[in-house]
Image: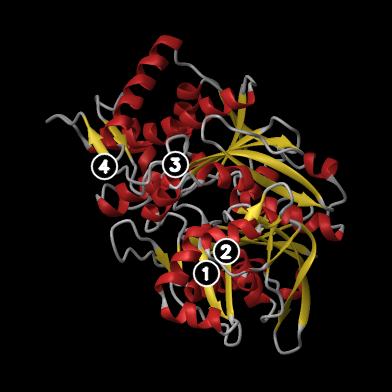
Amino acid sequence: MKYALSLDQGTTSSRAILFNKEGEMIAAGQREFTQHFPRPGWVEHDAEEIWESQWASILEAFDKAGCGWESVACIGITNQRETVVAWDRDSGEPACPAIVWQDRRTADFCEALKKAEKESLVTEKTGLLLDPYFSGTKMRWMLKNLELVRALSDAGKLALGTVDSWLIWKLSQGLSHITDVSNASRTLLMDLRRCEWDEEMLDLFEVPRSALPEIVDSSGELAKAIIGEGGLEIPISGIAGEQQAALFGQLCLEKGTVKNTYGTGSFILMNVGEEPAVSKNKLLSTVAWRIDGRTTFALEGSVFVAGSAVQWLRDGLEFFQNASEVEDLARSVEDSGGIVIVPAFTGLGAPYWDPYARGAVLGITRGTSKGHFARATLEAIAMQSADVIAAMRDDSEQSLTSIHADGGAAANDLLMELQADFSGVRVSRPQVLETTALGAGYLAGLAIGYWENFEELKGLWSLDREFVPSLDEESRKEKRALWKGSVEFVRGW
């Protein structure tokens, strides 16, 4: 039996999942790794720990499935996207801590570029906005502020990349320095229409082309993992940033189809076809995937804090021991008791794009309980996504009557009910919630014939449950107005 092995390298943990030809999860391994917060607004990872956690998750999956590398037909990789790793090409050692997508340290630089009226040029070229979220500003910061990174660059030994590039470098034993077009489209350095590194953007962000990976398709025989002393070679044939992989895993293959992934953040993507979309609501135009040289584009709204707000209740406030307990706690009260939580812990993403916003809890009374906090947190997750869905509806001029939901928090029925109510759309949850990993597996498997075509994949998707809006329009407007007023309170903090 041969399997498609998906490596799902996320913000807080690394996972490895084996899928069979029916798209069923055979076994999975997972390892959490350390989050570092050296200063307010800074978020870092240890790149070596990321690799070690990913490798350990693979071995755990093999152990559960009772197999080994010989049972792997292909490898698909999906990853936290804008996080940047810098390493020495000769030694393979990280040159500094990885700067995570949530990190805000480059906010002042982004503001300076905006004041210099560079944002319209950046958006026209890349489809993105000037925000610390994206990789290019992080790369520039490393080069400007870290002596070892500068020295490696001067010596022509520096490798820069997102986490997909780092994992492929390690798996290929340093033979391949590549990234797929979906990850490259998140850097601020790629021309969105040509899907190539753009010299004007490289100059603007002062990033040397020599340090960057080669941009490749999202599906194809892209690189080879070299395993063990015998040098067993396994094709790395699928690569996509985590949100694009989820769009593919949800089989949103037609123009106008939409998914929302509830992970550390919440990310809504719409397939917009073979031409980039232009947003008037500060949504992002990005690459969904490229297969056989043909590019599919997406419109995206990024919410920075979703599942991490539940982690805050668990770890910061110690309301419960397991994140899954939040639903029961939230259902212990009829409503949020009049409180609103705006979890802008690392600023606000779409459609606000305010790196200076910070979180707030508003409307507390003596009667406020843990249950009210839990319910308000779930409401905040749903409200943030509703903001994006409203902007996407306006940009696309489509009714958006349905979205596909996935990610760990999509298992929370109350959250799905709130999402349907606040956004006014049906929410469809598939039986397999691991659609990010599944998408990477599908991309990998298609390249080698493990799955034949899109039609075969469509036959593998199955519905678990659909959530239908039950809130009347007047009540929805009242709740949305209260939310929007609360958001304005925390902006520019």
The answer to whether mark 4 and mark 1 are in CB contact below 8 A is no
- Screen quadrant of the N terminus: bottom right
Position of residue 379 relative to residue 221, above or below, is: above
Mark 4 belongs to which amino acid?
Trp
Q: Which residue is mark 4?
A: 493
The Cα–Cα distance between marks 2 and 1, rounded to whole angstroms, is 6 Å
Position of residue 76 relative to residue 442, above or below, is: below
| Residue 162: assigned label | 2
Q: Of tags 4 and 2, which is closer to the observer?
A: 4
The Cα–Cα distance between marks 3 and 2, rounded to whole angstroms, is 20 Å
Q: Which residue is mark 3?
A: 349
- Screen quadrant of the C terminus: top left
Q: Element under label 4?
A: loop
Q: Element under label 3?
A: loop
Dot 3, how many residues are within 10 Å of its Cα: few (below 14), some (14-19), or many (20+)? many
The answer to whether mark 2 and mark 1 are in CB contact below 8 A is yes
Mark 2 belongs to which amino acid?
Thr
Mark 3 belongs to which amino acid?
Gly
The Cα–Cα distance between marks 4 and 1, rounded to whole angstroms, is 30 Å
Residue 32 visible from this viewpoint: no
Dot 4, how many residues are within 10 Å of its Cα: few (below 14), some (14-19), or many (20+)? few
Of the residues under marks 1 and 3, which one precedes in the sequence? Answer: 1
Q: Which residue is mark 1?
A: 85
Of the residues under marks 4 and 1, which one precedes in the sequence? Answer: 1
The Cα–Cα distance between marks 4 and 2, rounded to whole angstroms, is 30 Å
Q: Is residue 46 left or right of residue 486?
A: right
Q: Of tags 3 and 4, which is closer to the observer?
A: 4
